[in-house]
Image: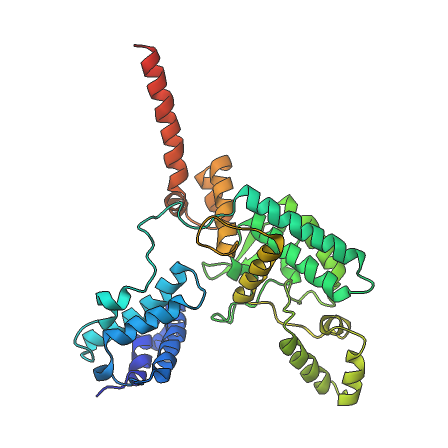
Amino acid sequence: MVSIDAVIEDFLTDKGKGQGGESGNYRQDAGRELDRFVEFLTGHEESPTSFDELDSGHLREYARHLTRQGWTAGTVRTYYAYVSAFCGWAVREGHLAENVAQRRNATEPIPDDGGHKSGDQQAWSAEDRQQLTSFVDEQASAAIDDIGEEREAAIKACRDRALVYLLSYSGVRGAEILRDRSDERRQGLRWEDVHLEDRYATVFAKKQRLDDRGLPKPVIHPLQMYRKVLDAPSESWPVFPSFHRPTLSQQVMDTLDRRGYTDTEIEEMRTDRSLIELCVEYDIEPPSITTDAGRHVLKRLCEEAGIELDDSEEYLMPHGARRGAGEVLVRTSGHAAAARALDNSEEVVREHYSHIEAGELADQMTNAFEEADQQV
């Protein structure tokens, strides 16, 4: 019997890039997901460990497990695809008789894409964007008024507003400005990467290199005010620091301990300062919030702002902000301009926003038939 866990490294090597198949995004992402799959199987009551014990029922349960994690339908399909690819590879290697991950009963829990390629994904509407930005404006303004008593609240409110505005108007990807646990190169946007006077920010783009993103005028003021309120001691600080108390507490304790402070001294420092204030005062760099945490921030803000969506989504998500920006750009500036701003090819933009072009063609056809009918 061939152990499932024993051949994962062989699969990743075959799928990897570079010398010995040791690099590549697919290898890294697939490795993470297969680790999660093995962990799931280990916790299963039958605990299948070999391919002889693996059947489509286990894959069905895993598919159902993925759908319960709160991820988008596209993310669930992507994660399941890694496991399916592994099973397909196992068939070619002679470990499995068939790809059990592709049996109908296994894939049934996977959310369908509906067969649509354009217009079916969340895109922030102008009304949603205005409601959310108005809410974070009010929250930040009130917090700044009380900054003398609650500086932590002011920093957090200004951080949230800057995040909402940057997502709303720039079209950046969440992974370009927030920390991505699956990619150590993506540690979140830093203040040294933000150039407010020239209105651009440098991000690690999807194409695996540094690239510049424009900062439209609405984004500038929220970032300026936030920068002033935060008053980060170093340009290397993340623009969107985490406020997760256990993480910050451990960071503060470890850093000050290395600097020679006693436990008593550290406790005294913490008596009249919040953790983020302590980080600022003693230049203890916090980690950036993760892409998952960014989604939780948006979910919280939507709940507080009373934003209710008509579709199946519970809240306004980062990818919805990007698609919303794309909708505006395509309608006002055309596919080529939208492609440049969104760091995509014009072909991809035309595919993703084909519903807009179809609507415009429908209007042209309507006008054509009206003119034709008038000539009869």
The answer to whether any part of residue 198 appears in the image is no
Residue 113: quadrant of the picture: bottom left
199, above or below 365, in the image: below
Q: How many marks?
A: 0
52, above or below 339, in the image: below
Residue at the spot 71% in from the left edge and 67% down from the top edge: 234
Q: Residue 99: x, y in percent?
A: 21, 71
Q: Nearer the viewer, residue 300 or 260?
A: 300
Q: Nearer the viewer, residue 149 or 1?
A: 149
* Side of 130 where 319 appears, left or right: left
Q: Residue 161: x, y in percent?
A: 65, 55
The figure's colour scheme reads rainbow
Residue 10: quadrant of the picture: bottom left
* Side of 172 where 111 appears, left or right: left
Residue at the spot 66% in from the left edge and 79% down from the top edge: 251
Q: Residue furthest right?
A: 148
* Side of 366 where 195 appears, left or right: right
In the picture, which quadrant includes the N terminus?
bottom left
In the picture, which quadrant includes the C terminus?
top left
Q: Residue 183: x, y in percent?
A: 48, 70
153, above or below 338, in the image: below
Q: Residue 312: x, y in percent?
A: 44, 54
The answer to whether any part of residue 376 appears in the image is yes
